[in-house]
Image (cartoon, helix red, strand yellow):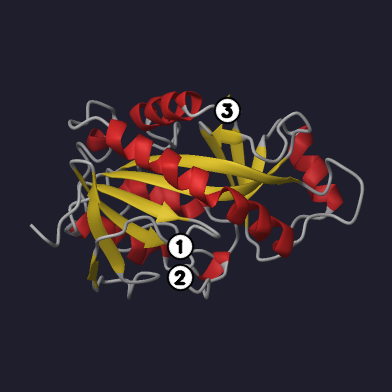
């Protein structure tokens, strides 16, 4: 099927393309249009849907990304496993630029984003104690180590509203709480994936030390983009290896996330 994929990749800042020979799909959703047309192609034997989170021209700031449309569109195309590379700042001096963190926890510090599909028609409470797919994490860690990445297994991603960066005081507070990295787009993406019973794995590339970790002028957008651009080819290679290595059959808890719950809407 042309309009079908098994695995989705949501590209972050600076990660605007992945596949070469693609079919572009305009996928409508009840939540509006996704960030961009979705590109469907192959990586090895796997059919993959690629969507740039911010749009190919980076027109969507973090708090304006159509997260609900993005995840809904991918599921409607058949996607059940999602790999999500993104750029983050480090809250730990030992995890400097170039470190790949595969987080296992998330803290939400956003304020204005629609973060559920189930806001009418009755309460739906989905378990989110472990936000990321264990099978996806294991696959990503193995692929990263095989690719000689400096890799951190686990850690907490704190997601801020943006689009501004943290103050030094905020950054130091995040560090004092034991959190590991800071970004702007990992939420509500992860929880929306869980509400659709999708597997979701974050590949968090450290591009800078956050403002409270070192002295100086603090992080700038230009520095983040330049660092990610310098590493995007390597990140594409990693994503390709992760996609090729994901299990064909999902034996993780993610497919059962909605078991026993009466949903007020029909899922695609």
Image quarter of the N terminus: bottom left
Residue 151 is labelled as: 3
Q: Return the residue at label 1.
A: 16
Which residue does the image show at 47% across and 41% down from the upper left? 202
**Distance between mark 2 and mark 3 Cα atoms:** 28 Å
**Distance between mark 1 and mark 3 Cα atoms:** 23 Å
Task: Give the residue at the far left of this rendering.
Answer: 1
Picture layout, residue 52 above or below residue 175: below
Image quarter of the C terminus: bottom left
Which residue does the image show at 52% across and 75% down from the upper left? 59
Image marks 2 and 1: residues in contact by CB distance under 8 Å: yes
Residue 182 place in picture, x, y as percent = 66, 46
Residue 209 place in picture, x, y as percent = 76, 43
| Secondary structure state at the residue bearing disc 1 | loop
Q: Between 47 and 79, which is closer to the camera in this rendering? A: 47
Residue 121 appears in the picture as rendered: no
Q: Quadrant of residue 53?
A: bottom left
Q: Between 147 and 207, which is closer to the camera in this rendering? A: 147
Picture layout, residue 96 above or below residue 108: above
Q: Quadrant of residue 264?
A: bottom left
Which residue does the image show at 51% across and 52% down from the upper left? 187
Nearer the N terminus, badge 1 or badge 3?
Answer: 1
Nearer the N terminus, badge 2 or badge 1?
Answer: 1
Image marks 2 and 3: residues in contact by CB distance under 8 Å: no
Q: Return the residue at label 2.
A: 56
Task: Give the residue at the far right of this rendering.
Answer: 215
């Amino acid at each position: 099927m042309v309009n079908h994929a098994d695995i989705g990749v949501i590209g972050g800042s600076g990660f605007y393309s992945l596949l070469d020979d693609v079919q572009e799909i305009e996928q409508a959703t009840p939540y509006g249009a996704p960030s961009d047309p979705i590109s469907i192609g192959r990586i090895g034997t796997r059919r993959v849907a690629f969507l740039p989170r911010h749009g190919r021209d980076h027109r969507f700031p973090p708090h304006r990304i159509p997260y609900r449309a993005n995840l809904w569109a991918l599921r409607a195309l058949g996607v059940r496993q999602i790999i999500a590379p993104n750029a983050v700042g480090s809250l730990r001096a030992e995890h400097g630029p170039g470190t790949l963190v595969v987080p296992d926890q998330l803290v939400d510090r956003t304020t204005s984003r629609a973060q559920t599909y189930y806001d009418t028609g009755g309460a739906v409470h989905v378990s989110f104690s472990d936000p990321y797919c264990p099978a996806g994490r294991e696959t990503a860690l193995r692929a990263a180590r095989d690719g000689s990445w400096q890799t951190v297994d686990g850690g907490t991603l704190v997601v801020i509203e943006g689009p501004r960066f943290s103050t030094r005081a905020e950054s130091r507070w995040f560090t004092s709480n034991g959190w590991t990295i800071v970004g702007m787009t990992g939420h509500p993406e992860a929880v929306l994936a869980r509400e659709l019973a999708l597997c979701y794995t974050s590949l968090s590339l450290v591009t800078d030390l956050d403002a409270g970790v070192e002295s100086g002028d603090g992080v700038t957008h230009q520095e983040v983009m330049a660092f990610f651009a310098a590493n995007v080819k390597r990140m594409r290679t990693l994503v390709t290896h992760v996609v090729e290595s994901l299990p064909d059959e999902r034996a993780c808890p993610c497919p059962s996330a909605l078991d026993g719950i009466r949903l007020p809407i029909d899922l695609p």
